[in-house]
Amino acid sequence: MLQFTPKGILCVPGGFYIDPWKPVDLAVITHGHSDHARWGMKKYLCHHYTVPILKSRLGTDIAVQGIAYGEPVTINGVQVSLHPAGHIIGSAQVRMEYKGYVVVVSGDYKVQDDGLSDPLEILRCHEFVTESTFGLPIYNWQSVAAQHTQLQEWVAGNRANGKTSVFIGYSLGKAQRIMKALEGIAPIHVHYSIAVLNQAYESAGIQLPDYAIADLREDVKHLAQDIVILPPSLLDAQVTRKIPDMANAICSGWMQVRGARRWRSADAGFAISDHADWPGLLDTVKATGAEKVYVTHGQTAVFTKYLNEIGIAAEEVTTRFGEEEESVEPS
Amino acid sequence: MKTFATLINALDSTNKTNLKLEALMHFLAEAEEGDKMWLLALFTGKRPKRNVNTALMRQWAMEIAGIPEWLFLESYSSVGDLGETISLILPAPEQYTERSLSEWMQQIATLDKATEAEKKTFVTEAWRSLTHTERFIFNKLLGGSFRLGVSAQTLINALARYYNMEANAVTHSIMGDWQMDAVTFDELVQGAYTDTQLSKPYPFCLAYPLEKEPEELGPVQDWQVEYKWDGIRGQLIRRNDEVFIWSRGEELITEQFPEIKAALLQWPVNVVLDGELLVFKDGQVLNFSALQQRLNRKNISAKMLQELPVVCFVYDLLELDGKDLRNLPIKERRSMLEELLRQYAGGPLMLCHTIAAVDWEALKSIRQESRSVNSEGLMLKHKDSPYHTGRKKGDWWKWKIDPYTIDAVLIYAQKGSGRRSAYYTDYTFAVRKGDELVSIAKAYSGLTDKEIQEVNRYINQHAIEKFGPVRTVKPELVFEIAFEGISFSNRHKSGVALRFPRIARWRKDKTAAEIDDIEEIKKMIR
Ligand SMILES: [Zn+2]
Ligand SMILES: [Zn+2]
């Protein structure tokens, strides 16, 4: 039912693509990250919550239709529905059913409930397309509660030493998780690009902690000892260095490995990710009951080999996912 | 071990000296006596010997995690460190047991008499009761390969600040051959045992690379000029009929240089000298590869002593008859040194000559020619300079000759280890050999983070072949490789070995057709 083409993943009977990277007529979009939602499609179909994100990213004039989770749409005889992927707000797995055969393209997903996006729904299917960003057994996330404690303790330590806590995290998804983890600990300031996406959360009725917009081009003395959240592009920027007595932390799954923490040379690194860890990937793939699994971006070779070894037929697929998400990490 | 783990985590994560210093101060205030001792012990290389085979640890970890060996190896190649890989693939701890670092160390030390089954029980139980970071530290201690992510200077500064002492004094106190059970931490740092320690070296005085025009240094006559030798910097100590030779890496290397030891023992005075250990034969200094053959050997044969005789070019006098001379200006130390060597010289202890030049112009041409005597440039020491502790800008400069460079093409890439494990950062480069390519050097450093990410993108898109962690890359990216020396070598396919190769810059303006040919490169060898 699926064909992996140079334009993207094609649903053959439906005639539409999922997260294509070249212009097509109809693109079903799993979520708003830039490597999954690209410019130039005649029409977009995505979850309601993803609509404002697409518009702010790709322009308000795009043709986009929003649907709810579980709301079926029929396209050329294929019944299409979106289901929560737990990755970021509005992130969805695309379920396609044609003549009783079910295929699911999961986009990016995580198993942990971050309290912000709808938790991952396990879908039984014949074929499953999975990511493999953290498809190595070294990636085992701590519980969300433990992650929150880590961040809170770090901020408290910084404040005791008179330092400003600067967090670096992807503006869509990660930034909001950091905010939530630090609610009520200290005043939170976010970069403009994050504030724009916060609105997408707020318009979906999701409560975020109070925050102010930090304009780093202006005087930044008032940020002292507070919490500042910035996108990865500002990690080494001149304006960031002006923040008084700052200690900076990167929040990303890659920070699980000591080498990556040292390599990025921030002052701290926290393994907080919006992707599934190794047990998360394995459990999900098993739970779908899929007889055929396609493995996209990340540790494709390793994860494919392992699945085949444990008796799940899997195949490596080359896509262009994961390449533009950000320089610090494929978020 | 929680306090220690917090320290290690903080030291690992930041590269800001002041934050490392803060973390150390915090540890000194919080940790118990025994753990502080261990910090110093580990830092000064007093590691416990390895009591558990790492292959066994790997086996046990795979068993517990339930993963096949190839998957373990993939993980290992991505992490770059065995102890850390094991700490990460194990399931989350079931319960947490707090034991101090020294308690753990004691238990590890008793393992030498344990059976394999006992070792397994001990290790796997420890794994079950420690957090990720603590597990990692435990594994490294067990494997005898623990390293702290902090420089000697920062640790010494933290101790100095904590005890309100001079850094110099702290260094003197903690270097050397102290026994853990014989001292308390406070006594050790505060130097209670200094006098009894004959072997104690002084911290080396270091020079900065000269990055400005030498004319800015004032009249050339104010400077003591020497060749900069490419050997091993050594501090030679003779006190009360004993001789100790320390390397700059704070290692005792006395036994590796028996001829130097014997010669210094002949002297009738107690001295501490600073000089360069070099292979010197038929009136010529040989290059570093000759010296390398003399290093890290259990026994130095008579044949070796004859074929590769080592001398010390002595350039400074730090102590004479128990008197610390480091605060005298070097011109005075130098004349005392010359006098000493006039009296006792002969054999392998030789005075390192100074170079007199009328002006900087004359010195520049001498520097240009320094490769002809197998030196790597010049040292400039201000005649009024004391012997500083560590590096201080302004008094001592190293004025090296420009490195050799070649243009080569990237052919293999591998993920780095340690801090670079997330990216392909270990590169192999090739040059032309007629119509073929022949690999000539591996290099790990020299690119900016941004360039590394760009190269990584290229590698991901243009890898021709995957062989384990190695990627064969389409030979298109050209880099300028700089290096310090070149010699013939049978062990390299290209027939040459480069010394200290590194990436000077990415030549985006060049294509693979423009890289150098091996025959031309061989002409650089003298
Ligand atoms: Zn994503
Ligand atoms: Zn993705």
Image (cartoon, coloured by chain):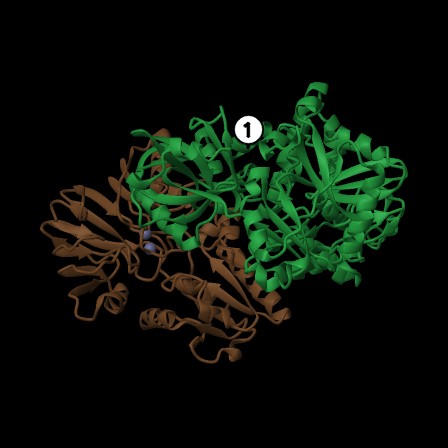
Residue B289 image offset from top left, x and y in percent: 58, 31
| Residue for point 40% across, 37% down | B429
Give the chain letter at badge 1: B
Residue B441 image offset from top left, x and y in percent: 45, 36
B384 or A189, nearer to the observer: B384
Location of residue B416 with respect to A203 vertically, above or below: above
Q: Is residue B322 left or right of residue A325?
A: right
Task: Determine whether the residue tagged by mark 1 lies in a helix, strand or loop.
Answer: helix
Could you say which quadrant of the image residue B292 lies in? top right
Q: Quadrant of the C terminus of chain A?
A: bottom left
Q: Is residue A9 left or right of residue B382?
A: left
Kindly identify the amino acid type of the residue bearing the numbered disc 1: Gln
Residue B374 visible here: no
A204 or B79, nearer to the observer: B79
B490 or B199, nearer to the observer: B490
Q: Quadrant of the N terminus of chain A?
A: top left
Residue lying at the far left of the rendered structure: A76
Badge 1: residue crowd in 10 Å (few <14, some 14–19, many ≥20): few
Count of numbered tags: 1
Residue B361 visible here: yes
Q: Which chain is green?
A: B
Location of mark 1 (residue) = B59
Residue B427 image offset from top left, x and y in percent: 42, 40
Residue B217 image offset from top left, x and y in percent: 62, 62
Q: Which chain is brown?
A: A
Location of residue B364 with respect to A299 vertically, above or below: below
Q: Looking at the image, in which quadrant does ligand 1 appear? A: bottom left
Q: Is residue B73 left or right of residue B467?
A: right
Q: Is mark 1 within 8 Å of ligand 2?
A: no
| Residue for point 48% across, 56% down | A144
